Image (cartoon, rainbow, N blue to C red):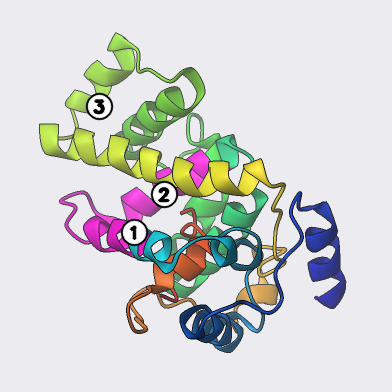
Amino acid sequence: MGETNKIAHMKSKLAPIERPSGLMMTFVYWMSRKQFGKVMTPLKVVFARLPVSFGRYVQKLEKLEQKYELPKYLAVLVRTHVAQLNTCEFCIDIGKLEVINHYPDLKEKFFNVSSYKTSSLFTPRERAALRYAEELTVNKKISDEAFGEAQKHFTERELVEIAWAVTREHIYNLMNLAFDIGSDGLCQLPETPCEGRTFDRGVETPKLGVSAVHYMQREHQMRHVHLL
């Protein structure tokens, strides 16, 4: 695991800040170590260089997701697919951890999301959502055909929420990609390496949220993090 961290840090375009300034960020680092056994690379590369208010903004995004009418697992499935399309290694890694801890019965579906078009694991509704998200991610627009298919399965509000989930995941993905932040080695494989770890997006610390750590960290965050 130490070697994984070393490799990830060597790749980042900005050197990780190992000793943050300010009590709040110091506390966030401590919470990250407590929850993940390490300080997440996005925390050290991105959020340690920003005012705490940026972390609070990420926390707000996390809370807004709780207001979705869209099933939570489907929103996470969409974000997982987006992270893979954008090749955000960090978000893919922490996303696996989130799935194992919160959706263990759906692991096979999540780990095979790239095959959604042909796999029998996915319902027509899920395929419609994933195609909608994929076209928005890859083409930056949605074809009339894909939109029409999505309309058969989702309300207008849910269509907006899917687009919101895609947009939110892009924030995490693009910030990590901008600085070559790769996987933190939390979940190298879909099986045992991360089954003993916890990922509680519901835990909150003063002011900054777990989500900030997910991203400052997740992720996504797992895509989509949430220590703050």
Look at the numbered disc 1 and give the secondary structure of its residue: helix
**Amino acid marked by disc 3:** Ala
Q: Is residue 29 above or below residue 11?
A: below
Look at the numbered disc 2 and give the secondary structure of its residue: helix
Q: Earlier in the sequence, mark 3 or mark 2?
A: 2
**Amino acid marked by disc 2:** Leu
Q: Earlier in the sequence, mark 1 or mark 3?
A: 1
* Distance Cα–Cα, label 1 vs label 3: 30 Å
Q: Which residue is more in the foreground, 211 or 89? A: 211
Q: Which residues are magenta?
A: 58-83
Which circle, 1 or 3, is nearer the viewer? 1
Q: Which residue is mark 1?
A: 57
- Left or right, 201 with respect to 21, comes to left
Residue name at image x 39 percent, y 32 percent: 133
x, y percent for residue 73: 34, 56
Q: Quadrant of residue 166?
A: top left
In the rendered image, which quarter contains the C terminus? bottom left
Residue 121 can be seen in this image: no
Label 3: how many residues lie within 10 Å, few (<14), some (14-19) or many (20+)?
A: many
In the rendered image, which quarter contains the N terminus? bottom right
Disc marking residue 150: 3
Q: Which residue is mark 2?
A: 77
